[in-house]
Image (tube, grey):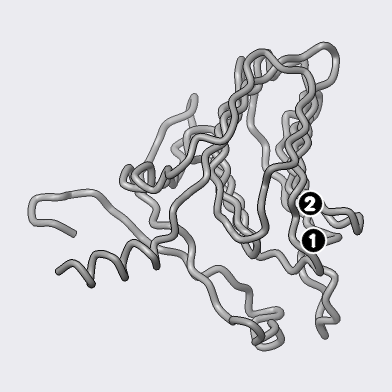
Amino acid sequence: MPAGDTRKVWIGWVNNWIYANEVPTDPWRGVMSIPRELSLTKKGDRLLFAQKPVAEVTELRETYVESFRDAERVHVDTIDGESAYELLLTVKDANCSDISLAFSNEEGEAIALEWNAQRQELFLNRKTVFARNFSQEPMLAFHAEIVFPDSLEIRIFYDRSLIEVFAADGAVVFTSQLFPRAPLTLLNASASHEGLFDLTIYRLASIWNRTVKDAAGA
């Protein structure tokens, strides 16, 4: 960290000892999360631990892909299988409207993020993209409670091997490896009960390419 920068930042190991020794080694093995700034935040009478992507991550926004305002349903088929993406999703009237957002492919595999307004819960389901013969059953879905949000802002980072989800000002975070047989190049989002949402999509530059270019120019 630069001198004088007092932020508390960490990078997470994206794995689980339940299956870490059985993760495929081809074409790669092992991955870390994006850097996250840590903080404590108060919600009502509760003190919560929060994680947010460091501000510098926005510098990787290379291409503005698409933006939707007051949408009920969205279909995007321009997601390629090699790039990383950042999505900014705002669920309006989150106390009444459910929403589902999924990356999928033609083989029926998908990673799905769902908001259930009645249960006040956010879910991430990776069952169909985690179909590996591990000796111990891994966790195939994650969920967290977000109590009575008027609107719900969710920030999503996605590439061919990983998804990271930040919601409720960083108090709710999901991180998951993905093992699809084919790239997840389709994006679909929809809201229920005449609900509306905003969605903005950016394609992100590779940090590896930036590092090579910077080193070459030095």
Q: Which residue type carries mark 2?
A: Asn
Q: Dot 1: within a 10 Å radius of its alpha carbon, few (fewer than 14), some, or many (20 or more) residues?
A: some
Counting from the top left corner in percent of width and height, residue 27 is at: 63, 82
Q: Is residue 27 left or right of residue 47?
A: right
Tell me, for residue 140, which label it has, or none: 1
Q: Is residue 189 above or below residue 58?
A: above
Counting from the top left corner in percent of width and height, residue 99 is at: 77, 28
User: Rounded to the nearest whole Å, what is the CA distance between mark 1 and mark 2?
Assistant: 6 Å
Counting from the top left corner in percent of width and height, residue 24 is at: 70, 84
Q: Earlier in the sequence, mark 1 or mark 2?
A: 2
Q: Is residue 85 above or below residue 82?
A: above
Q: Which residue is mark 2?
A: 125
Q: Residue at x 48, y 28 (%)?
A: 43
Q: Quadrant of the C terminus?
A: bottom left
Q: Are marks 1 and 2 in contact (CB under 8 Å)?
A: yes
Q: Is residue 54 left or right of residue 93?
A: left
Indicate the secondary structure of the residue bearing disc 2.
Answer: strand
Counting from the top left corner in percent of width and height, residue 3 is at: 8, 56
Q: Which of the 4 image quadrants contains residue 190?
A: top right
- Residue, far front: 217
